[in-house]
Image (cartoon, rainbow, N blue to C red):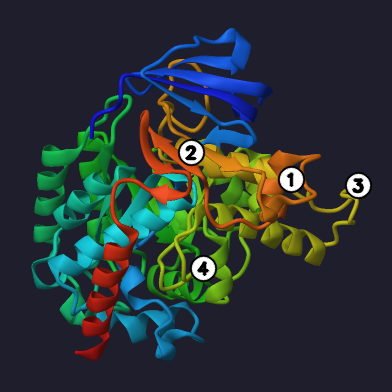
Amino acid sequence: MKNMGTLLVKNASIVVTFDSVDREIPNAGLFIRDGIIEEVGPTQDITQTADRVIDLRGHVVLPGMVNTHHHFYQTLTRVVPAAQDCNLFNWLKTLYPIWGRMTPEDIYISTKTALAELALSGCTTASDHLYLFPNGSRLDDEIAAAKEIGLRLHASRGSMSLGESKGGLPPDHVVDTEEHILKDSVRLIETYHDPKPGSMLQIVLAPCSPFSVTTALMRESAALARQYGVHLHTHLAETKDEEEFCIERFGLRPAAYMQSVDWIGNDVWFAHSVYINQDEIELYAHHGCGVAHCPSSNMRLASGIAPVAEYLEAGVKIGLGVDGSASNDSSNMISEARMGMLLGRVRAGLEGASLSGSDGPKILTAREYLKIATKGGASVLGRNDIGSLEVGKCADFIAINMNKLDFAGALHDPVSALLFCHTNRVDWNVVHGNIIVENGQLMTASEESIVDQHNKAASRLLSE
C-alpha cells in the first residue's frame, strides 16, 4: 500500500496529541507528507493545501490505538457452547482439538476478520500471537492477510512444544518440535522483520506459556531474539492455575521463572500479568518489562483483575490487548479501552477507594485509559514512532464524529465521552497517511465478503 503524498486534516473539534505535555488542541489539524506528520496545531496555523484535504469538523482526533495482544485465528471459534462457561485451562482443553483442524486458508480469513474489526474500532497497529500451526499453516498466511487490510502488524511466531505426554496442557498433536520452531523463527525474522522507523511489519518470538513450552525453548528463544534484535512475548500470571503449575513444576512463581530463563528485560512484554505481587511489579519496572492488559478476556474466563493502577504508579509500561476472539469474543479496541476503565474502577472499589478518589486505590480517568490504548501500547511494543500525534511521527490517527446519538448531551467533555459513552466504531482510521476507514466504512476490503468467507470457514471447522 502506498501513501498518498500530502494530506491535510483540518477543523477537528479537538486533536488529542498525547505528546510530552498531553496537549489537546481545539479547532486543530494535521499536515502529513508521505505518511509522516509535519505539522500539528490550530487549523489556521498549518499548511492549507494538500493532495487531499479532510474536513473533520465535529470530530475528535487522537492517535491510532495499539493492540498489544490478540489471537486472530480465534475469531473462528467465538461462542463455542462447550467453552462458554469455562476457566482458562478447561476452555483451552475444549478448543485445542478444534484449533488443530485449522488450515492455511483459515488462518488467512480469520486474520482478515480480526483486522477489519480492529480497524473499524480504532486500531492502527496490532500485535498477534499465533502459537499453533496445524495442517501446513504458517505465520506467512497471517502476514499476507494483514498486508491487504493495511494495519501495522507485529506478528508473533508463537510456539508450543510441551504436550500432555510430557506434563504440558496442550494435546501432543498440536505441539511442534523445538528444532522446527527455532528454524522457522529464523526464517521469518530474516524474511519479514523490518526494524526501521515507520515499519509496517515486525516479527516477535513468542513461546506460548509456561504450561505449553519447555524451559529449554524459553531460553533458546530469548537468545535467538537478542541475536536478531526482536522482541519477546508470552502469556504470564494469567490465572491461579498457572501460578500453581509454575510452583509445582519449577518451584518458582511465574515472574521468578521468567527471571530464571532470561525473560526479563525491556525487550519483553507479558500478556495479562494478573497474579503479580508488589515485588514483581517493581521487578517489571526496574527491567523495563511491558504488560498487555486484557480486561474483557480476564472477565470472560473469570481470571481476575490486573493491578493496572499499581503498574502505572511503579512506571511499568502497559498497553491494552483485546486478546483472542474466543475469549472476548470481540476484536474491538475502543470497547476494550472502555472495559478497562470500568474494570479498574471495580477493582479500586473492592479495595476501598472512595467515589471521590480522595483516598484508597487510584481511580484512573478516561484520558488515562485512552493513553494506555495508544501511547502505552506503542511503548510496550518498543515503538517510538507511533502512539502520539507529533511532528516526525507516523501519521497513524483515528477520528470519531461526536454529532451522533452515542454522544448526545456529552459535548461538554468529548474526550472523556469516547469511553464513558459507548460507541463501537470510529469514523476515520488512517495508517501512515493511508485511509483505512472513511466515514465508518472499511476501504481496504469488503465487510460482506469477509463475513461470508469467515462464516463458511467457521462452520466447516466446527462441523468436522
Vertical placement of residue 246 versus 123, above or below: below
Q: Which callout, 4 or 2, points at the residue further toward the start of the chain?
A: 2
Q: Residues within 10 Å of mark 3 (few under 14, many from 20)?
A: few
- Image side of residue 62 versus residue 392, left or right: right
Q: Which residue is mark 2?
A: 64
Q: Which mark is residue 365?
A: 1
Q: Which mark is residue 358?
A: 3
Q: Is residue 403 visible?
A: yes
Vertical placement of residue 72 versus 7, above or below: below
Q: Which callout, 3 or 1, points at the residue further toward the start of the chain?
A: 3
- Expressed as whole percent of the image width and height from the top left, the position of residue 197 reads 32, 24
Q: Residues within 10 Å of mark 2 (few under 14, many from 20)?
A: many
Q: CA distance from mark 4 to mark 1?
A: 21 Å
- The mark lying in front, picked from 1 and 2, is 2
Q: Which mark is residue 297?
A: 4
Q: Which of 217/107 is in front?
A: 107
- The mark lying in front, picked from 3 and 2, is 2
Q: CA distance from mark 3 to mark 2?
A: 32 Å
